[in-house]
Amino acid sequence: MTNPTLQTAVLAGGCFWCLEAVFDDLVGVISVESGYAGGEVANPTYQHVCTGETGHAEVIRVTFDPALLSYRSLLNVFFAVHDPTSLNRQGNDVGTQYRSAIFYLGEEQKQIAQATLSELSQAGIWQGKLVTELTPLDTFYMAEDYHQEYFANHPNQPYCMAVVAPKVAKFKKQFVSTLPLKSAAKT
């Protein structure tokens, strides 16, 4: 049985392992699933997406309770944990599959995302121009099982130690006083 009050957001901002690990820790997030969106090939595989030939981005699909966490707050976290001025790359991850994108579900999400992008552009937080795509979600394809909860299941994997763990730590430091975190509730 689905809960009609829950909402979904689909975001791309580099490697989905990084984004999933960050969003997993927010109170109000029910689930985070890694996947692919924004491409032309049906049922893409990770190997095919990595070639850059499918047009897909690595994305996360976040199911959240808007009574506990707003879509706007999700976007604020999204923009804080990746570089929205970097075209088709995040750090050493290069290619269109690592682009910054918001795949909106409905007019309300589109309007909130447009307002957020406009406010961030005007605030001049980043030196470069924001390149985040704003696109309606066509189809979300679930990534292979081994990508789900990757950081939680492989914290000692070299990429996770070098890239994901520092991103999660930075996120927690930045948002610990403004957003309730699941890890803070456990202590």
Image (cartoon, rainbow, N blue to C red):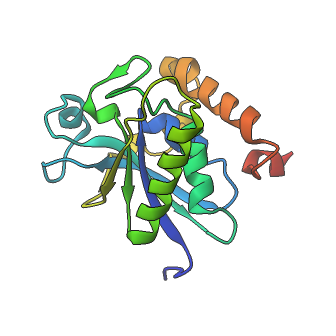
Residue at 18 percent of width and 52 percent of height: 43
Q: Position of residue 165 (x, y in %)?
A: 61, 26
Q: Is residue 62 left or right of residue 152?
A: left
Q: Is residue 100 left or right of residue 40?
A: right
Residue at 75 percent of width and 33 percent of height: 173
Q: Position of residue 37 (x, y in %)?
A: 28, 50
Residue 156 sits in quarter = top right
Of the 4 image quadrants, the one containing the C terminus is: top right
Q: Position of residue 119 (x, y in %)?
A: 55, 47
Residue at 50 percent of width and 61 percent of height: 112
Q: Nearer the viewer, residue 185 or 81?
A: 81
Residue 122 sits in quarter = top right
Q: Residue 2: in sight, yes or no?
A: yes
Q: Is residue 61 left or right of residue 174?
A: left
Residue at 51 percent of width and 34 percent of height: 18
Q: Nearer the viewer, residue 80 or 64?
A: 80
Q: Position of residue 31 (x, y in %)?
A: 54, 58
